[in-house]
Amino acid sequence: MPRESLIDRIRPFIFVFLLVFLPIALFHAFTDYMYVYRVPAGTTVVDRSMVKSHSRLGEYLAGLKWTKEHPWIEPYLGYRHYIIPDGATELRSAFQWNLNVVSVTIPDSVTKISRMGFRGCKKLESVTLPSGITEIPEQLFWECEALRFFRIPDGVKTIGLGAFQDCFKLRKIVIPDSVETIAPGAFGHCLELREIVLPDSLKEIPDYMCADCANLTGIRIPDGVTAIGREAFLRCLSLREIAIPDSVSKIGDRAFDRCESLERVRIPSGVTAIGSDAFKQCAALREAEILGGIDRIDVRTFMGCSSLKKAVIPAGVKRIWDEAFSGCAALEEIALPDGLLSIDHEAFSGCEALEKIDFPATLETIESFAFYHCTSLKKVVIPPAMKEIHYGAFSDCSALSDVEFTPPSADGPKMYIDSHAFMRTAVPPEKIPKSR
């Protein structure tokens, strides 16, 4: 039997190489040529003029008549992956509105990136920021719709205005303890954001920080935060729980407006101001515990919280403003504090489950339609300090049949009762005294 030659022995391996490995190698070489762009070595400042969008072959193909007749192929001809060389120190809006870029490799030598540096890069999926930067500039990743995960490097101290706004697919972001300031709207309208880890160094939740993050289910506000800004969590439709630390002193307007899945809220005693519409239309909210520190319940604070059954208003509150609890159809129990002076327009209108309410002896004014359409309310006792009961204050309280007026002292205040204050109720007219 003749001996096999060396060629005969390695022929199967040559066949496998030619059939499998060589096409793969050629494919990667072609891909690297077509889609990977390396910024020339020695570049220190990378701007738009330094970043090419097409290879020579891509430019040639883009110029063909067939390509122009089929513009859908144009995005497949541009570079997708960019590599910045070591030694570069600054990026100047080099990639703004680049619709082809998928990834960018940035060396640690880069210490500065300009505002809006990657804005509108709708296919950007991956970018690792260098460890030397101290700021995420304003609108840096605005409308980077394909970005899914991002870890901010240690050493960053500031996250700029709208830095990640409209990153629709961003699911998780980790913020290091070095961050001290987050500007308004930093993560606004990140529709898929499910998790955000805030640093213990943070002192304030800025305005609009997570507004319209519809899939955010929970967030831990660090101890030490003193304020929750305006619309910070507006329309976070999936947010189920929020723990407000004792360090917080202010909750801004519409901070949790339309958080439709929020079930319970505890507002600590250190809070001295709750803005208007703060918890408006939190449809799943069942219990609101306010421990003290505020002097009023602002306009529409709990309006439309249709599942709210119990609310405790702390001592020190002197005024319940317009529509504060309007539309809380399930509200069965409300504790009003001594020292309360005024219940304003439509404050409890539409609280259909409310059967009883005890007015404190200090109450002086019930404004128009304050208890409109409280259809389960059966009896009210008007305190002796009462000065004014305005038009429609108890109108359409169809079950209300008993009103008790506490006789005033000889030197007590004069009282005005509008002739329509108890219209469309079951209260006999003779039970309603004339204004005195």
Image (spheres, helix red, strand yellow):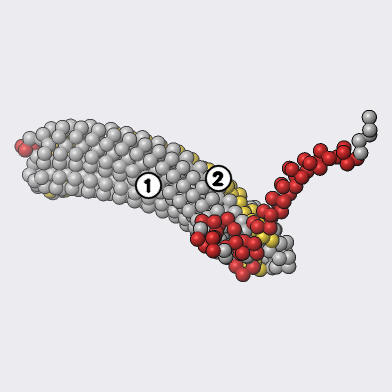
Q: Which residue is label 1 attached to?
A: 257
Q: Nearer the viewer, mark 1 or mark 2?
A: 2
Of residues 386 and 38, which is closer to you in this image? 38
Relative to 354, 106 lies left or right: right
Residue placed under numbered mark 2 in the picture:
172
Pick out the residue farthest to the top.
1
Tag 1 and tag 2, C-beta contact below 8 Å: no
**Front in this rendered view, residue 338 or 51:** 51
Q: Secondary structure at mark 2?
A: strand
Q: Residue flagged by tag 2: what amino acid is it?
A: Lys
Relative to 354, say whether 107 is above or below.
below
Q: Residue at x 60, y 61 (%)?
A: 61
For the residue carrying disc 2, how many other residues have a C-alpha within 10 Å: few (<14), some (14-19), or many (20+)? some
**Of callouts 1 and 2, the N-terminal one:** 2
Three-letter amino acid code at disc 1? Answer: Asp
Residue 372: x, y in percent? Answer: 19, 41
Residue 250 in view here: no
Q: Is residue 275 left or right of residue 160?
A: left
Please tell me the numbered disc located at residue 431.
Answer: none
Give the image location of residue 378, x and y in percent. Answer: 18, 32
